[in-house]
Amino acid sequence: MVPLFVMSLAPFSGKTAVCLGVGDRLRRDGMRVGYFKPVGVTVGRPTEEDPDCQLARAALGLREEVSLLCPVTISSSFLDRVLRGDGVDAVGAVERAYQDVASRFDVLVIEGPTGLTEGALVGLDARATLVKLDARALLVERFDSPMVVDRVLGAQALLGDRLLGVLLNAVPAAQRERVDDVVRPFLERRGVRVYG
C-alpha cells in the first residue's frame, strides 16, 4: 500500500479537492484507492463528523464508516475531554484505524492537517503523523502572493525528506508566467519539487 499524505499550511488551499482528484484518477487507472483523515476538526461547527471525510467517502464510493476513515475528530466535547486530561488515546486510535484501512487499498490518500501544528494537542501534528504513518507529503498551497515560497521553505525545513513537493493552487492568470519562470525554478533549486 502506498500512502500519499496531502496537507496545506492555510485553510481553503484546495487540499480536499486535490485528495478527491488524485483518488479519482488513480481509481480510473485501476487501483484500489482509499481515503483516510487521521484528525478532523469540527470545533465551532454543528457536526461531530468531519465534513471533508463525509464528502470524500461519498465521492470515492467508500463503504467504510466515517468513524474509521477519520478516527479522531476534535469537536468541542472532544477538546474538553483532552483539556481535562480524560485519558484520550488519539495516537492509538489513529494507528489502529490506519492499519485496518490501509490493508484494504493499493493507495491511501491521507488528508493531513491545515498547518504544521494542527493536531499537536493530541500528539498528531503534521510531522508526527507523517512519521507514525511512514508517509510522505504533498503540500497544497494557494498562491496568494509570491511570499508563498517562504511558507513552502518553512515547511521543507520542518518536514525534511518527508516532503514530496508542492502543488501551487489557484494561481491567478496574471501571475502564471511569474510562477513558471521565477517561483518554480527558485523552489526547485532549493530542492522542492513543484507539481503544478
Image (cartoon, grey):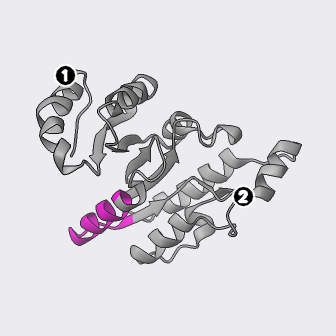
Q: Could you tell me what secondary structure mostly forms the magenta stretch?
A: helix
Q: Which residue is mark 2?
A: 75
Quarter occupied by the N terminus: bottom left
Residue range (magenta): 18-33
Counting from the top left corner in percent of width and height, residue 112 is at 49, 48
Is disc 1 surrounded by few (<14), some (14 to 19) or many (20+) residues within 10 Å? few
Q: Position of residue 117 (x, y in %)?
A: 58, 36
* Residue 23 covered by magenta stretch: yes
Amino acid type of the residue tagged 2 in the rendering: Ser
Name the one closer to the observer, 32 or 117.
117
For residue 106, say whether it is visible.
Answer: no
Label ID, residue 5: none
Q: Is residue 42 left or right of residue 138?
A: right
- Location of mark 1 (residue): 189
Seen at 88% across and 44% down, the residue is 84
- The residue shown at (50%, 44%) is 133
**In the displayed structure image, the side of residue 26 where residue 57 appears, left or right:** right
Residue type for callout 1: Arg
Marks counted in the figure total 2
Tell me if residue 133 comes above or below residue 49 in the rendering. above
For image coordinates 69% across by 66% down, the residue present is 48
Task: State yes or no: discs 1 and 2 in contact (Cβ < 8 Å).
Answer: no
Residue 180, percent from left and from top:
13, 38
Q: CA distance from mark 1 to mark 2?
A: 41 Å
User: Is residue 102 a member of the stretch shown in magenta?
Assistant: no
Is residue 122 visible to the viewer in this orientation of the structure? Answer: yes
